Image (tube, rainbow, N blue to C red):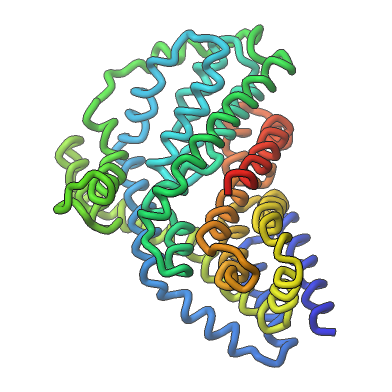
Amino acid sequence: MLVIAGIAILILTVILLIKRQDTRTVLLFSGLLMCLLAADPMAAMNSFAQKMVSEGLIQAILSAIGFATVMKFTGCDRHLVRLLSVPLRRVGLLLIPGTILLTTFVQLALPSAAGAAAAAGITMIPLQLAAGIHPVMAGAAVLAGTFGASLLNPGSPHMALVAKIVGGDVMTIIGSRAMTVVWLGLLIMVGMTLTALLRREHRGYHSTLESEMQADHQPINLLAALMPLLPVTLLMLGAFGGVGWLKMGVPQAVMWGILATLLVTRTHPGKAIPAFFDGMGKAYSDVFGIIICAGVFVAGLSAIGLIDAAKTLLIDYPQAARFGGTVGPFLMAIVIGSGDAAAYAFNEAITPHAAAFGMDGTNLGTAAAFASYLGRTASPLSAAAIVVAGMVGVSPLDLVKRTAPVMLVGLLLLIVLI
């Protein structure tokens, strides 16, 4: 009986999220309600308290997003995008895969999908329009570039969570998934280019924005353009480059990046440092708030018996875990518009029990994360889709009509790869 009630609450949760109710509020009260029905309200309260101080996740998430705020405040993110966009000018159809590649690269440095889409879209959307690419296709190319490269960022909370669950090293896990991003990226670039050709949206659009692009050609500060990449570079060199003295955590790398940015941009520390902490506070509210509330939701699923029922199903049918670990998060992310919430919920609830149904925890956890991000890129409810749609003046649904089929093929490739 409790399991049936849990399923009903789960369905109601999905409906509320589709209706764009606040993700944190819905997850928090859904989890609390399930715990109350299971006569274990303290399970929700204890989960809430524990998630508030998840040390490893707090350090990575807050410092990384605080750094991204400083990059936006100093304009370094725009210098990076403009630097990378210059070689892509006037290449016609190749602008579509070029835009996807650039957005992917930017998202590696700026983990927020909406932030990366906005940063890349500022330059790449007008550039595509000037080249004759239809606005909806120009926006879809930017959106497609947010498919999940940020999972290779050492500040990724998902890889940190998987590492915590399996007791592994986050940099080792990230390194093992680099080729997954490469193959998915190649497939998405080809798929979106073919989509443009089939829809005949790769040329013929007459834009009035080319003169605006030319008027915006301010000198690019090369050093400023490199600043968003500095923390990632330091972490990669320390982990894989054999430079032992550079081995450090995300917060340390971020602080070096901020210090270098202050010197390069000559920004007053009294303005940049408050921006950094403002970004950290917003990260705790917007990102870590979802993690906390997703933890309460998972506690509710556990208390009411749904997790045990799912585990029993996967143990009885272990072949289902491989597909459930990708298709499930993919569909959830499409429905709720949040790859983060889908990945957190699955990895908190299912991945710790991977060994029980014959799967490697690293494979299952990372597959769920990638699938969630692919699903988010196919969702008209995602923040990135809404941001890009606003930039090109179309409906988010129009964008995902172009990205969703390609992301579905990407999901099939992910199942094969992982």
Rendered residue at 70%/52% (across/down)? 327
Residue 293 appears in view: no
Furthest residue toward bottom = 39
The relative height of residue 227 versus residue 370 in the rendered view (above or below) is above
Q: Viewed as shown, does residue 317 lie left or right of 88?
A: right
Residue 210 appears in view: yes
Rendered residue at 27%/18% (across/down)? 219
The relative height of residue 64 versus residue 110 in the rendered view (above or below) is below
Residue 223: quadrant of the picture: top left
Quadrant including the N terminus: bottom right
The relative height of residue 136 versus residue 44 in the rendered view (above or below) is above
Q: Position of residue 172 (x, y in %)?
A: 37, 54
Q: Viewed as shown, does residue 14 lie left or right of 349?
A: right
Q: How many marks?
A: 0
Q: Position of residue 352 (x, y in %)?
A: 55, 71
Q: Position of residue 38 (x, y in %)?
A: 72, 88
The relative height of residue 61 versus residue 99 in the rendered view (above or below) is below
Q: Position of residue 80 (x, y in %)?
A: 34, 30
Rendered residue at 39%/13% (across/down)? 215
Q: Viewed as shown, does residue 409 lie left or right of 81?
A: right
Q: Viewed as shown, does residue 393 lie left or right of 103?
A: right
Rendered residue at 84%/77% (across/down)? 4
